[in-house]
Image: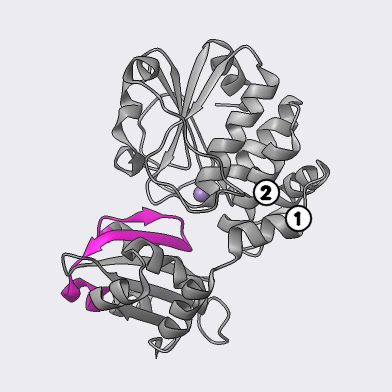
Amino acid sequence: MEFKDIRRIIQQHDSIVIYRHINPDYDAFGGQLGLKHLIKVNFPDKKVYCYGKEMLDNPSYLEPMDEVSEEVIRNSLVITVDTSTNARSDDQSFLLGKQILKIDHHLRSEEVTPYAYVDPEASSVCEIITRMAMELGWIVSQRAAELLFGGMLTDSCRLSIPNVTGDTFRAAAFLADQLIDISWVNRCVFDNDIEGFKAGVAFENKIQFADDLAYFRTSINDMHEFGLTDGEIKDYVDLMANIKGVDKYAVFAQMENGNYTVSLRSHTASVVHIANKYGGGGHALACGIPEVTAEQVEEIIDLLIKAR
Ligand SMILES: [Mn+2]
């Protein structure tokens, strides 16, 4: 598929519902809300809704999801953004859509529809959507640009990971030209509150090192003590992103049922085969596993040490 095919499909529908993945990050929200703003401005006659149950607490930056009835979904084009598999969608009602269009940047993205634009080389889905708006000559409002820029920053670790290219910077420059407040967007997507910061300090004290691997493991008690979900604890993986001699890093966050949910990162060696082996996935250098046992945590640590 090319960007003009996406435009053609959008043109064929009067009503559009945009979905994204569970445990949403700012790339998921930015792609979803950013695309909504783009369609509303460039196709003013169309009805556009954003659907999703989970929300991040950031009302000054994000916008609430829309109330969408089942009937509306059945009569709409559904667009899923940043969602690699059916199971990852928030929620499964997207399958009711009249037609499903997928825009994604994950490796091994599940083939859920023939209408899919998947570019695993792109550093974020927001980069893909920005490049589409540039190529199609769409009007990009300041609000759309803020949302898309925030998503680009989060998934690309502030434009620092290996799949950041000249195209990424050209997309970022295009968004900057829409007069966004770059430092404000950075703070919106990266600032932590004081409680969250203190949790990070506690997690730093749990970090263990093995060869070029750094990792920490949290318990059910940690979740309760810091008022964080296992999913939120996984987001602390970036605490280990800038340690000399550390190439791979991981978080093993215990869940209420005693098992662990896992976040894996690497600067150079691909680790996604490890995620795939245990039922997870994502990108070569940034991936996750929904649930493993304590025994499997030990196996994963061994595999991470061996990954080259
Ligand atoms: Mn993404």
Residue assigned mark 2: 149
Element type at mark 1: helix
Q: Which mark is residue 182?
A: 1
Question: What x and y, as percent, mark residue 217?
Answer: 32, 79
Callout 2–callout 1 Cβ contact below 8 Å? yes
Q: Residue 289 in magenta?
A: yes
Question: What x and y, as percent, mark residue 142?
Answer: 75, 39
- Residue at x 73%, y 30% (from the top left corner): 135
Q: Give the magenta range.
A: 277-300
Element type at mark 2: helix
Nearest the eye: 44 or 133: 44
Q: Residue 226 in magenta?
A: no
- Residue at x 54%, y 22% (from the top left corner): 48
Nearest the eye: 137 or 272: 137
Q: Identify residue type, mark 1.
A: Ile
Residue 163 shown left or right of residue 239 in the figure? right
